Amino acid sequence: MVSEHQPAKLAAFEGLYETPEGGAAMSLFGIPNSQEKRMEYNVEIPGMLSFLVHGDFNKPVTGLDQFPENEQPPVAIPYFSYHIMIALGTYFIGITLLALFYLYRGTLFEKRWMMWTFVFSVTGPYIANQAGWIAAEVGRQPWIVYGLLRTDEGFSEAVAGSHVLTSIILFAIIYALLFAVWVFILNKKIQHGPDDADLSDLETHQMLNKHKLADA
């Protein structure tokens, strides 16, 4: 969908400064160099971006060189925020599969390090959500409505910059207070631990798993 409707954004996500003659590689990690229009220290999977977009490892994907300079988004911010989101998503899948394996073996709640991993991983989805939002919004630049209305044409003459700044500060204070409440409640729940009924169900589940393993 991004390649079809906002191709310049996809190019920024992947640090694709030039349209390749053949298949486009998917960048796993690198450092965008917008001055020299290239990726530095780039680790990539050859042809994978073409496969994801077209289902063909050899079909080209449009790079930033196909767009006028004044219609190209900045690359660094969308690239890093997009890759942070993807990396966190991959991490969530990994720890979930590992936890399911331990749960099947009946040893999940005996893995103290895994429990701590879950505790600190709670913040991950919020970081991934914000990173994805930043990637989407910055990657769309310089457009408010892609291809129709530019950001510099969308400023309101009735709203001063000081009003916007005040709103941002107030929202930041509100969200900081909500974050503090969230941490307090989360910590209280963790300190309380599972209810007796939950522990009973857990012990029954672990006992059944041990019997299954013994029979196997």
Image (tube, rainbow, N blue to C red):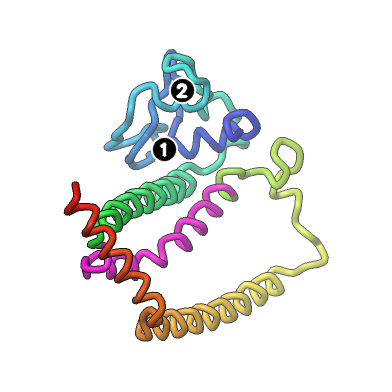
Q: Specify the principal SS of the magenta part.
A: helix
Q: Which of disc 2 and disc 1 is earlier in sequence?
A: 1
Q: Does the magenta run of residues contain 135?
A: yes
Answer with left or right where residue 139 lies relative to residue 113: right
Residue drawn at (21%, 68%), measured in percent from left and top?
A: 110
* Residue type beneath disc 2: Ser
Q: Which residues are magenta?
A: 108-136
Name the residue: 28% across, 60% down: 208
Query: What's the amino acid at mark 1?
Result: Gln
Is 199 placed above or below 63 here?
below
| Residue positioned 42% across, 23% down in the render | 24
Q: Is residue 58 magenta?
A: no
Pointer 1 with pointer 2, Cβ within 8 A: no
Q: Is residue 153 above or below residue 18?
A: below
Q: Is residue 143 left or right of residue 122?
A: right
Q: Quadrant of the N terminus?
A: top right
Residue carrying label 1: 35
Percent from the top left, x then y, of residue 215?
19, 50
How many circles with numbers are drawn on the protein?
2
Comparing 210 with 86, the one in front is: 210
Residue 144: x and y in percent read 70, 47
Element assignment for label 1: loop
Name the one closer to the observer, 45 or 16.
Answer: 45
Question: In the rendered image, which residue does mark 2 sit on?
Answer: 50
Q: Where does residue 47 sit, x and y in percent of width and height?
A: 39, 21
Where disc 2 sits, the SS reads helix
For the residues marked 1 and 2, what is the alpha-carbon distance in whole angstroms?
25 Å
